[in-house]
Image (cartoon, helix red, strand yellow):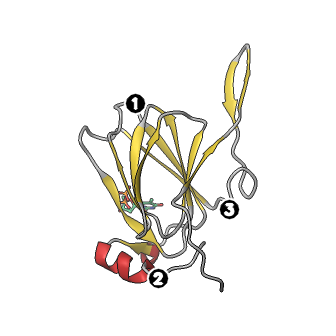
Amino acid sequence: MKKVDYDISKLIEIEELGDERGLLTVIEGNKSIPFEINRIFYIYNTMTGIRRGFHAHYKTRQALICVSGNCKVYLDNTKRKTDVVLDSPTKVLILEPNDWHEMYDFSPDCVLLVLASHLYDSEDYIRDYDKFIEVYKNDTVF
Ligand code: TYD
């Protein structure tokens, strides 16, 4: 496989469909996001000051959407580190398996929706940072 330098996760802006009744936003697997959706979970009622996540994956790709309120996501793909603000239901953050991620600064009304490419499997998690670096330090693009 050709080795290419790769970008940290992608932030996609999804179209907002609105009329006199209000707003509606659609996300379709393999269309507006680059994978099939096999699992959905959401994080809410997060206590003040909590930071969560602290892992990467071997296989799972994810799309993060703050459907209510706001939060921040810290990302590290071994090459670059960045912080992304999710503050709109039209912003979709794509996380590749090799994105170490930590979510923080949750507003009290934050509902963070996560669309995942794979069913839950604890074996697909890399929770040790040193292990994450070891696995992905020489990695190619996803
Ligand atoms: P955890 O991975 O600790 O959440 P975060 O990475 O956001 O800090 O998940 C909390 C608990 O929920 C943990 O016991 C695993 C369980 N869980 C599932 O059973 N299925 C899932 O799809 C997810 C995301 C978590």
Instruction: Left or right? Give the position of 142 relative to 36.
Output: left
C-alpha span from label 2 to label 3? 24 Å
Amino acid on which the number 3 mark rests in the picture: Phe
List the residue tagged with mark 2. 138
Comparing marks 2 and 3, which lies closer to the viewer? 2
Label 1: element kind: loop
Comparing marks 1 and 2, which lies closer to the viewer? 2
Closer to the camera in the image, 79 or 136: 79
Q: State the image coordinates of residue 72 (x, y, percent, origin top left).
A: 39, 43
Dot label at residue 109:
1
Name the image quarter holding the N terminus: bottom right
C-alpha span from label 1 to label 2? 39 Å
Label 3: element kind: loop
In the displayed structure, would residue 2 be above or below residue 110?
A: below
Q: Is residue 53 visible?
A: yes
Q: State the image coordinates of residue 98 (x, y, percent, origin top left).
A: 48, 70
Dot label at residue 41:
none
Q: Earlier in the sequence, mark 2 or mark 3?
A: 3
- At 27% from the left and 40% from the top, the residue drawn is 47
